[in-house]
Image: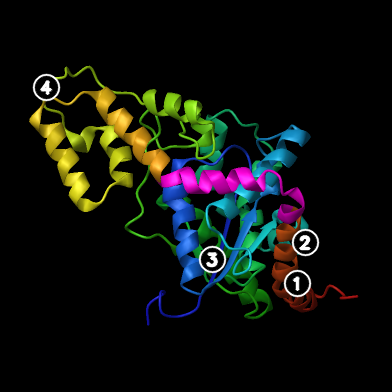
Amino acid sequence: MTDATRKLTIVSGIQPSGNLHLGNYFGAVQQFVQFIREGHECYYFLANYHALTSVREPGRLLGLTRSTAADYIALGLDPELAAIYVQSDLPEVCELQWLLTTVTPMGLLERCHAYKDKIAQGLSSDHGLFAYPVLQAADILIVRANRVPVGQDQKQHIEVTRDIAGSFNHLYGELLTVPEAYIPESVAVVPGRDGRKMSKSYNNTIELFAPEEEVRQQIFSIVTDSASLKEPKDPDRSMLYAVLKLFCTEEEREYWRDRFTSGGLGYREVKEAIFDLYMRRFEPVRARRRELESQPEYIAEVLRRGAERARRVAAPLLREVRAAMGIPNR
């Protein structure tokens, strides 16, 4: 039986540390919507505790948390079919995190490459950043998830979660569901405007809900080489083609591939095509997002109901964990 034909429990979180972009959509949100349509039990949360490692302005964090919730709804995450909630509205997560730290070897955390990468990017070397994988494990384990959609660069965190859950189960009994990473082969890594992976931390994104002129500027700032109009161009080495093909059918991809390799194609024409395809693809959800701007009470209610739904799973599990570890339940 395949994942698509049996019901799974899926969890994923996103840090509300910046505006959503094409990489978020094609690398994650598009799959989240598909999981909902397939009837899986889905938990999608806004990881505001995690965001504290990089966002230190309270008002900005609060605003980004609310706006990311609206983004998710506009992009098609149906709050009637999936739990959309804020991480801090699930207090069981932080308690489980502490309980899990008591079975997490230091060496396991010291090997995590994400910590080293973040330090290299200039984030402060604090305990929150170092212990990030344990909180992430608690996020996953608290809702008994058995599948976690991640990119290849996040696979190690799921392996850490599996190790932590295995250590706990060995000591206290088989209470925690050991999850598996879900890394679909068909999901593309979206290049940023500078050629690196598109990421808020690299400031190289094309945003989903920025004003139209700002989106145009972002697309037109994609770095290109100095090839002349007449020269043939290699689509497999072109960031423009990598972005363009995200919006195209197979037939359209072949058309543009031929245009690249035949010569006579200017980069401005390709950028114009990307902008047009972007607007065609996202204008309906951008319109929905504008509607949600005037519905803060609805967004708050969605998040409240999402947290309640998650707690129906989280609270009983935490009681079981506390009892197994000798912590009184009251």
SS for dot 2:
helix
Image x and y of residue 185, in percent: 32, 58
**Quadrant in which residue 270 is drawn:** top left
Residue span colored magenta: 281-299
Residue underneath mark 1 = 318
The residue depicted at 20 percent of the width and 38 percent of the height is 236
At label 3, the amino acid type is: Arg
Q: Nearer the viewer, residue 47 or 244?
A: 244
The quarter of the rendered structure image containing the C terminus is: bottom right
- Mark 1 or mark 2: name the one nearer the start of the chain: 2
The quarter of the rendered structure image containing the N terminus is: bottom left
- Mark 3 or mark 2: name the one nearer the start of the chain: 2
The residue depicted at 68 percent of the width and 35 percent of the height is 55
Q: Badge 4 local density, few (<14 within 10 Å), some, or many (20+)?
A: some
Q: CA distance from mark 4 to mark 3?
A: 51 Å
At label 1, the amino acid type is: Leu
Image x and y of residue 199, in percent: 48, 37
- Mark 1 or mark 4: name the one nearer the start of the chain: 4
Q: Nearer the viewer, residue 186 or 220?
A: 220
- Of circles 4 and 3, the one toward us is 4
Q: Nearer the viewer, residue 141 or 229?
A: 229
Residue underneath mark 3 = 162
- Mark 3 or mark 1: name the one nearer the start of the chain: 3
Residue underneath mark 2 = 95
Q: Residue furthest right?
A: 330
Label 1–label 2 contact, CB within 8 A: yes
Q: Badge 3 local density, few (<14 within 10 Å), some, or many (20+)?
A: many
- Of circles 2 and 4, the one toward us is 4
Residue underneath mark 4 = 231
Residue 6 vs residue 173: left or right?
left
- Mark 2 or mark 4: name the one nearer the start of the chain: 2
- Of circles 1 and 4, the one toward us is 4
